[in-house]
Amino acid sequence: YSVALIAQFVLPDVVVSSDLVDFGRVVLGQRKRITVQLKNVKKVDVEWSYREPLNRFGKKLPPAEIVFNLHAAQQAQSGVLKPGERVWVEISFTPNAAKSFQQVIALRLKDNSQKKTIVVKGQGDALMAAVAP
């Protein structure tokens, strides 16, 4: 006897409303937030997660060194989306120097070796006061 098995394999994935987020100019010590949407367009649940960047020793960075960060509803950095479900995630930019910043935020998707990436960039600006006689 021969048994033929036929299956449709669906790789979990999300669609990001914007894969490039430009914060523009932000004053040092201030925080700017931009919200993007993650949507599950597949017919299977997708489990996603974000881990904050680590230093070269694998330890968490101090808050003052985290320039870009990502948070979803209730300040979670992970979740499960059912088919057709969407979640709004907030990306924040808090410059710590008067210079340009650019980083790639990678979202991990369970059972998918490809990471979903969002390029984030911004410019830190210092306030300057000039006094003339």
Image (cartoon, grey):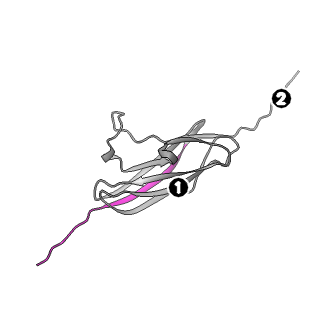
* Residue 19 in view here: no
Tell me which segment is drawn in magenta: 115-133
10 Å crowding of disc 1: few (<14), some (14-19), many (20+): some
Examine the structure image and report whether residue 27 is included in the region drawn in magenta.
no
Quarter of the rendering containing residue 1: top right
Examine the structure image and report whether residue 123 is included in the region drawn in magenta.
yes
Separation (CA) of disc 2 from disc 1: 44 Å
In the depicted structure, whether residue 80 falls above or below residue 33: above
**Residue type at numbered disc 2:** Ala
Write down the residue under mark 2. Answer: 4
Image x and y of residue 11, in percent: 65, 40
SS at mark 2 in the image: loop
Front one among 27 and 113: 27
Image x and y of residue 97, in percent: 28, 55
Specify the farthest residue to the right: 1
SS at mark 1 in the image: strand
Q: Residue 36: which numbered mark, if any? A: 1
Q: Looking at the image, which residue is at 68% across and 45% down?
A: 83
The reply, left or right, for residue 30 in relation to residue 6 is left
Specify the farthest residue to the top: 1
Front one among 121 and 3: 121
10 Å crowding of disc 2: few (<14), some (14-19), many (20+): few
| Mark 2 vs 1: CB contact within 8 A | no
**Residue type at numbered disc 1:** Val
Q: Nearer the viewer, mark 2 or mark 1?
A: 1
Position of the C terminus by quadrant: bottom left
Q: Looking at the image, which residue is at 60% across and 47% down?
A: 14
* Residue 78 in view here: yes
Image x and y of residue 77, in percent: 49, 42
The reply, left or right, for residue 42 in relation to residue 29 is right
